[in-house]
Amino acid sequence: NAGVTQTPKFQVLKTGQSMTLQCAQDMNHNSMYWYRQDPGMGLRLIYYSASEGTTDKGEVPNGYNVSRLNKREFSLRLESAAPSQTSVYFCASRKTGLETQYFGPGTRLLVL
Amino acid sequence: GQQLNQSPQSMFIQEGEDVSMNCTSSSIFNTWLWYKQDPGEGPVLLIALYKAGELTSNGRLTAQFGITRKDSFLNISASIPSDVGIYFCAGQKGGSEKLVFGKGTKLTVNP
């Protein structure tokens, strides 16, 4: 039982490049989340998915798209990366009816 | 968006000292969670609180759900070097899919 896994662990992009961050969970959770973490800002919600086939915007969705591919997988796409998107990105999942979110190890992204 | 005010922002303490941190909000939450993030890792749940006034312990950690439902406290007793990290509070309103996070308290423990 790996919990929440994220790939890649590190990525360097040039401004304007695109990439997809992958997240998968093996806990059969219905809800999945994408956060970004910046120094002094805590964790800010980008997008979330309450169930397979649904996605909703969080606090900072601009510049991102998501896909809930199936119950296990929730990907985050940057279509045209900007330096302001340099951050650490965390995926999390949650079982319906419980409040606790379980986090992945993070993806560290640097946009030059 | 909603904000949780977490304080202090950082703490520098000596090994063996006790630590206290808290989170406050202008609105009511039904659940309070406390997470710890080790350097280079994702946050890990420490304690979950579900009822106003609830006091819950996890080893040397004790957390309380405030009576007003607008605040929560985390205490760490007899700190050790592995307590180093960032501690986050998070609140959830009833029926919401989302957690609201505080900005974190960075703890440094000097041996």
Image: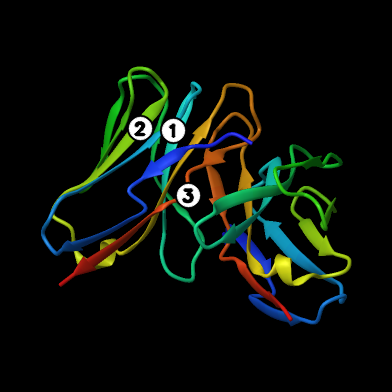
Q: Which sits earlier in the primary sequence, circle 3 or circle 1?
A: 1
How many angstroms separate mark 2 from mark 3 (CA)?
14 Å
Mark 2, residue position: B72
Q: Which residue is painted at 79% across and 70% down in the image?
A: A82
Q: Choose the circle earlier in sequence order: 2 or 3.
A: 2
Label 3 crowd (10 A; few <14 / some 14-19 / many >=20): many
Q: Say left or right for A79 vs B5.
A: right
Is B54 positioned to the left or the right of B27 in the image? left
Residue at 64%, 27% (x, y): give it. B96
Contact, mark 1 vs mark 2 (Cβ under 8 Å):
yes
Left or right of B106 in this view: A42: right
Quick check: A53 above or below B84?
above
Towards the viewer: A99 or A87: A87
Residue B66 location (% of width, % of height): 33, 24
Q: Which mark is residue B51?
A: none
Mark nearer the N terminus (1 vs 2): 1
Q: Are marks 3 and 1 in contact (CB under 8 Å)?
A: no
Describe residue B14's horizontal placement relative to residue B7 as left or right. Answer: left
Identify the image's colour scheme: rainbow, by chain, secondary structure or one colour: rainbow
Q: Residue furthest left?
A: B16
Q: Amino acid at mark 2?
A: Ser
Q: Nearer the viewer, mark 2 or mark 3?
A: 3
Where residue A23 sits, quadrant-wise, is bottom right
- Residue B68 horizontal/vertical position (percent): 37, 17
Q: Residue at x 86, y 77 (%)?
A: A17
Q: What is the secondary structure assignment of the residue under circle 3?
A: loop
Q: Amino acid at mark 3?
A: Lys
Chain at tag 3: B
Residue located beneath label 1 in the image: B32
Q: Are marks 1 and 2 on the same chain?
A: yes
Check the image and report above or below for B108 versus A35.
Answer: below
